[in-house]
Amino acid sequence: MAFGVAGRRSWPGLAPAAGRPVRAVMASPRAYREAPEEQLLSWSAGGDRRAFDEIVARHGAFALRVARRLVPDAALAEDLVQDAMVRAWTSAGRFDPRRAKFTTWLYRIVVNLCLDQRRKLRPEPLPEGFDAPDPSAGVLDRLEATESGAALAEALAGLPARQRAAVALVYDEEMSGAEAARVLGLTTKAVERLLA
């Protein structure tokens, strides 16, 4: 699954939720790229697939990065992100911008799907050489980087799923503790305890 400016994702299998007709031709053109997420989601709830394509283009790559950190298999992470996007599409009409930011709502869907999947899977050891060496580094630098990277990955793999999610959101994705707490459905204090 490709995301990004050049890789806008088409969602041919998506149909509007039951009872929501797809709007054919609009009277005035919509400025999808300039529209805020809440407006895009509102248009999506009305069946506007181009609006949802813009949501995917804006947030798909980040959602995939989060999923890749929480589940061991890249293909599975892509499937989970696609499932999250389908859920966002079918639930677009129920999103309430007064309760949470759109990104918090979307990433919570992604994190919950990943946590559910991790509960189903037995932990697997990391494959040998999962971290490619830096070609510009010397032999000793590469050895040290490989050892420290493997130690870090092993330590992260040993963490409970919710703690690993908190670490990924705060340290890898540079979310604040409060943002990570909203995504995980926890208090800020609980996230701080997970990071301690």
Image: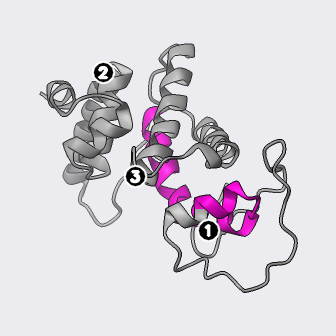
- Which residue is tagged 3? 101
Q: Main secondary structure of the magenta part?
A: helix
In magenta segment, residue 169 = no
174 left or right of 74 in image = left
- At label 2, which amino acid type do we have? Leu
Q: How far apart, in angstroms, are the residues tagged by discs 3 and 1?
A: 17 Å
- 2 or 3: tag closer to the N-terminus: 3
Q: Quadrant of the N terminus?
A: bottom right
Q: Amino acid at mark 1?
A: Glu
Q: Specify the color scheme.
A: one colour
Residue that mark 2 sits on? 159
Viewer-proximal residue among 118 and 175: 175
Query: What residue is shown at x 61% (from left), y 77% (from top)?
Result: 32
Specify the quadrant of the image occupied by residue 195.
Answer: top left
Question: What is the distance, in whole Å, between disc 2 and disc 1 at their CAs?
Answer: 35 Å
Left or right of 98, for residue 35: right
Spatial CA distance of label 2 from label 3 is 28 Å
Residue at 65% across, 40% down: 87
Q: Secondary structure at mark 3?
A: loop
Q: Residue 141 location, x and y as percent?
A: 20, 53
Percent x, y of residue 91: 64, 42
Crowd rating for badge 1 (residues with CA inside 10 Å; few <14, some 14–19, many 20+): many
Residue at image location 33% in from the left, 18% down from the top: 160
- Asked whether residue 143 appears in the rendered view, the answer is no
Q: Which region shows up in magenta?
A: 41-70
Q: Secondary structure at mark 1?
A: helix
